[in-house]
Amino acid sequence: MEFPMMNAVSGILRRFLLPSLLWGAFVAVSQAGAADATEQDMVTQEVVLWTFADKEHWIVHWPESSGPARHTVQLGKDSSALVVQPSDKERILSFYSGRMKSNPRIEGMAELRLEVELVSGEGVKINPFLMDAHDEGLMYKSQTLRKGRAVYTWNVAKDVVHSWGRQTNRKPDGDLRLWSLNLTVPANSAAEVRFHEAQALQRRHRLDYVNAAVETGHPLFLVIPGQDYKPKLVLKNTRNAPLGFKVRLEVERYDGAKRNAEVPVELKAGGDAALPIPDDLKDFGIRWVHYQLEDENGYAVKGKSSYACLKPAGPTVGKAKGFLFSMCQHSNRYSDDIRELEIRAAALCGAKVIREFSSWGTLNPKKDVWRWQSADEIVALAEKYHVELQASLGLCAQWDAPEKGLSEGGWQFLFYPPKNLENYAEFAGRCAERYKGKIRFWEIWNEPDLSHFWRGTTDQYIEMLRLSYQAIKKADPDAMVLNGGFACLGTDHPGTKLNPDMHERVLRDGQQWFDIYTVHQHGLFDVFHRNIHQHLGRYRGLLKTDKPLYFNETAMHSVGLSEQTQAETLFKKLLYAWSVGAMGYTWYDLRNDGEQPRNPEHNYGMLTHDFHPKAVYCMYNTLARLLSDKTYVAPVSASEGAFVYLFKGEGAHVAAGWVEDPTVPEQMLTFAVGKNARAVSVDPMGNETPVAVSDGVVCHKFGAEPSFLVVRNSDRCEPIQGIVGLPKQLTARPGEIMELPLSLNNPFDRPLDVKLRLGLPAALKLTDNQTGEFTVNVPAGGSKTLKIRLLPDQRPNDAALDKPIPMKLEYATGNGLLQAQLDVPVQWILVVDAKSLDNPSPLFWLHTQQQVVSIGAHDPSVTHLAWKGPEDLSARIWLGKAGDAVVLKIIVQDDVQQQPYTGAEIWKGDSVQFGLQVPGQEGYWELGLARDKDGKPVVHTAIRPTALADPSESVDLQVARTGTQTTYVAKLPYAAFGISDESLARKGVKFNLIVNDSDENVREGWIQLGPGIGEAKNPEKFVEIFFRE
């Protein structure tokens, strides 16, 4: 997951380190374009983009598949040269800087100017490639280089000759950034080209030259109780002319509450102003600040930033004694001030272990040459902030890299095993010797199961693990050796194809050479939970001794997700990891690696690239503050689909959990505590709300949002039967009476009145003239059951997207212990008919990150294939009837259509797979639908019930592609599938569907209605649907 040597340019605070005319992360694309402004509002000036100095580190992208590299890059202090040797083929060389691909991002570029010198050669052509704010790649026309030094100019709007990406209008939209500079060298020709400077001619509105930044006075943009930090919006006029405008401010909290303000501003030439941000600062948590600067003509510039109010969980003195709250970061890439700020930020939110270390090539740049300064500095910083390092040792030093790795160019040699494995082992041993007593965790490489990081064999890795283990233990017998954290559980990740046996064989054949078993497994909680549930037991079963388990790099980016979802992912994965016996959990990573909003690798952080907090930083702080001194006790009994865990500390107990399954009611759990106990409910941001304790009993509601119950001043906290027990799930079928059974329980030694009130959605009615209000007297220590009869109507049209409809259950107890309102979801059985196909609203809409399964997710080598949003892949689905056939209609939004396969392999390309389970049949149906490379429909039956014929030939499939939409209409004859009008109406069918995606002749993954097709086949997870006349 980690990128070595990436983005060493710090860019810590763009408003200070980059020229003010480069519009950074703080300000989004203007609402009104320059064409809407008057001529006097526009400002034109030149900007230096790249100097081609060695610190920018320009390289050529040359994969192994392209053959031998017959070129070299010569980096200089103020320019770089590309020297090309003759070849029998024309060569196209993509010259780029990984650092410059992110920064700067230029708004309002009118012209690109490259100062280039053709030192030798003829017929050499150059054309730039840029990327716009919508991730559209723009290819510009080629220009032939002239001998000597010259400036070549491109009109950014007019000189585009080709484009690619998600939105291909062949126009530069929003800010632009480098992709590459391509040189074309004729066959049998040599050339030397020196790059001197790149400039942009910018034409922008005068309001764009106002820098806006949220400040609090704290370097991490925090407001801490008892300290004099106040949030404000700082405005700086970077031009030498006065400027007047108004500022609109909106401050949003984690729970969605908002405060607004509007302020007129007059800035002198070069002047500034600081506007107080409206916030009473009474509650902890994230604050998202949305601001808009608007002039008198309506031209507007919008921006978003953040700060947070919190009580820091750290730093705390001493090493962690229990569960390891850990963090990945890349401090060794940055300058001293950035490095210290990163470690301070990690310590402040409660991290006790930082997965971080200097690389082999940095510490040992040549054989027998050792330079320890960078490692010494980071070890000293860790000691200063009371954290310890989990050192990840790697990757390959250039001086010991194999020729194959060196020939690929750039940094590709890093991922190859060294020529002499003993050199790596010596490096590991020397590190353990030098930092004995200071570093106790040593990890051998990173994600060796992925070919992106390890391009050797499994045998080579096991041998390197053995040699390193022996060297480390010889230097420090108390040190703990970790296997290189495996990227994933299972072998379905395409990155494991080089060594599919790596994970299993290291555990089976190399287990004596490591002390701690480390796994990563990025992704949302459902992916994490499913893979642990399906695979972890098998892997751990290979170990002859019970080695500690450490999830030492696992997280989820925020691309396509809200910050709340990212924060909740941390909460869920950390608690679940702890519950399955893990010794620690490491979030990846502390800070965003860049500023590209659609690049997953730039959005894993708890902080933005310029150190502003995200919601997940506050969540981590809350978890660490409440649980870092606690021990895990046990799971708390709750409905399946709800996860609640109990923890214990000195005189305090914590129950933490949530409801994952949207069809499961909120859980009101009851605990027996000490008579003098005090209890509070704590939200994800750390805000406490008192909870009543009555006669040693306390209740707490767990719902979809994570929460904590903290019980203090008590020697016990034992789950007991709840006062109101709800059914696990409720299912409604239109026109048929259903029951809501409630179990009422009294944990007290005196009778208890339970008062209930139902709030019903419009599609549910009470029967038997009931009013919806009930009072039940429950005897001391006893129980009673109340059954409420309800009559469902048709499912509302606005709830037709496969989501349950909640009813509200309010109840209170006579002793004043509890007053609560619970959401009780009702899952409508879906009923469709012939008219359903004409409904403008689909039966199902697949369009969220939670519905996406990405095969290569979290592998840096294919991060560009990650799901970008509904325009990348989404689907609307209708089901209905026509005559003696079930009709399935799917409209797929897919930016790139690729289907080179036929027959049983169509699932590898863009296609649909759907499943039907018909009651009474032995087995189920699974069919694939596709549009082949010639535009013809393809139907393939992959699974069918026992003794039933293949229906493929009888399925009438119409498929059409218009723009970026593919429409499938499939008629499934009753006779071919063994169904009838009567069976569809009385027994229904179970249905599921996925849409596969392939953009670069590789199956990226799919978007799904639900599990049961794409991974483990399981028709029990299909959705039940009935058909009516």
Image: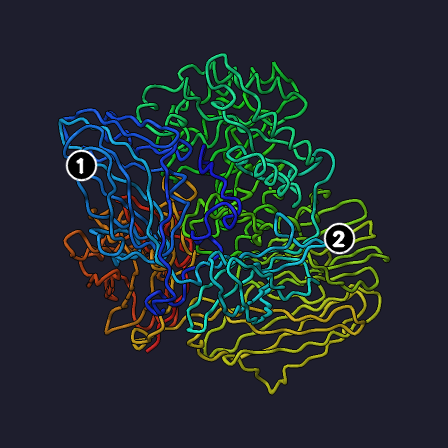
Q: Which residue is mark 1?
A: 146
Looking at the image, is mark 2 or mark 1 nearer the viewer? 1
Q: What's the coloring here? A: rainbow
Q: CA distance from mark 2 to mark 1?
A: 82 Å
Q: Is residue 225 left or right of residue 573?
A: right
Amino acid on which disc 2 is placed = Glu
Residue at 68%, 31% (x, y): give it: 383
Q: Is residue 351 left or right of residue 718?
A: left
Question: Label 1 neighbourhood size at 10 Å, few (<14), some (14-19), many (20+)?
Answer: some
Q: Position of residue 876 (x, y in %)?
A: 34, 65
The residue sitting at the top extreme is 368
First in sequence: mark 2 vs mark 1: 1
Q: Which residue is mark 2?
A: 718
Amino acid on which disc 1 is placed = Arg
The residue nearer to you, when weighing 882 against 284, is 284
Relative to 582, residue 418 above or below? above
- On-image quarter of the C terminus: bottom left
Q: Position of residue 156 (x, y in %)?
A: 27, 53
